Image (cartoon, rainbow, N blue to C red):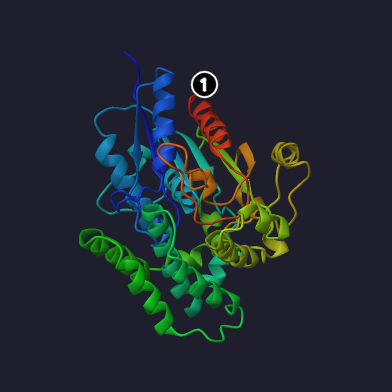
Amino acid sequence: MSVKHHVYLVPGFFGFTNLGELLYFGHAYEFLKQDLARRGIDAEVVTVVSHPTASIRQRTADLLKAVSETASGDDGPIHLVGHSTGGLDARLFVSPGAQVSEALELEPFARRVRTVVTVSAPHAGTPLATFFLGLFGQQLLKLLSLFTMYVLRFGRLPLSVVFRFGHLMARADDQLGWKATLLDQLFDQLLGDFSSERRDAVTKFLWDVGRDTSLIPQLTPEGIDLFNGGTHDRPGVRYGSVVTQARPPSLRTRLAAGLDPYAQLTHTIYAFVYGQTQRMPLTQLPLHTPAQTAALVQAYGAMPGPTACDGIVPTRSQVYGRVLAAVRADHLDAIGHFDQPAHQPPHVDWLISGSGFRRPQFEAMWKTIGDFLLEEEPPR
């Protein structure tokens, strides 16, 4: 009788797996599930529902709840695949001695974990979190999360919204001209296009984002330094990482985005968050092993510089354990949110970076993840 594998996809910052048709891991879930089935592997793939911007400890408790509800019936191996902040949740889950929930015991499940894969995760933090600590950043975060959900549901934002938001971004650095009434108007216009039931769900999600933002200071380079000091690798667990690097905003990336006004103005959003992410302190960049360095050089042709990033997380912050893949992609490309509408179901992009990442690269990347999950395990 074959052993049953339990694979958990852990969402990142403001992951919205609980909003019906708005699927955070939709494409990754379907591909990984089908790929494991083709290999003849008995596997259950579960997408985890996490509090969107709660602390890493709370989000890890959410992961524990999902595991306890779906993996208690057997003693099969557990695999954790976390995108962005979800990679940090996965690391805390397996850290020896971690205490994340008073209601559930973690250790019986943590000792069953065989692999931890992190995708575009901020293992050394991200300067973008520092920006989101400010009042303007907090309001912008809620608006960006609503934008993401809107585009995944309807395909694109209304041009009237994009032009007004583009004007806001053009003046964001000095925050001149920013008015709460403008943000309120953008929220009202976008929410009005959802059905009544979906509007209530999205509103609740955004309320949760505003109510508990304790994750944000934890994702700053200084906050992650403290996290790394208390979070340790578990012996016997194999750790791997997928690393993403996007092209810096330039005339080339603007041309790659196309002439469509929507694409050009949403590229402005990408350029803004990319600029914030570039500000990684040199003292916070982690040292890499020779094998990790060699993998990055082989993939990119040279070692990524200190300002290299995927628009959300510095590239060199994403390295942890074995580098499984290092790709030219932005932060959301890696989980299937890129521009390929002809594919069924369609891939929808809202962070238009001009990366050129498409379905072949996506499938190759996730196949590599599947290979890693099923490698022969070291003796315990």
Q: Is residue 66 above or below residue 350?
A: above
The one nearer the camera, 310 or 188, is: 188
Indicate left or right for 224 with 113 as reference: right
Whether residue 193 is visible here, answered yes or no, is: yes
**Viewer-proximal residue among 336 and 62:** 336
Look at the image and tell me whether residue 113 can be seen. Answer: no
For mark 1, give the secondary structure: loop
User: Residue at point 61% right, 58% down?
Assistant: 259
> Residue 30: where, in percent of width, then height?
39, 34
Q: Quadrant of residue 285?
A: bottom right
Viewport quadrant of the N terminus: top left
Q: Image height check: is 262 above or below 164?
A: above
- Location of mark 1 (residue): 376
Provide residue 343's location: percent of width, then percent of height: 46, 37
Residue placed furthest toward the right: 302
- Residue 108 spot, x, y in % from top left: 33, 37
- Within 10 Å of disc 1 (Cα), the crowding (few <14, some 14-19, many 20+) is few
Q: What residue type is labelled 1?
A: Glu
* In the displayed structure image, the side of residue 66 where residue 93 appears, left or right: right
Nearest to the observer: residue 362 or residue 374: 362
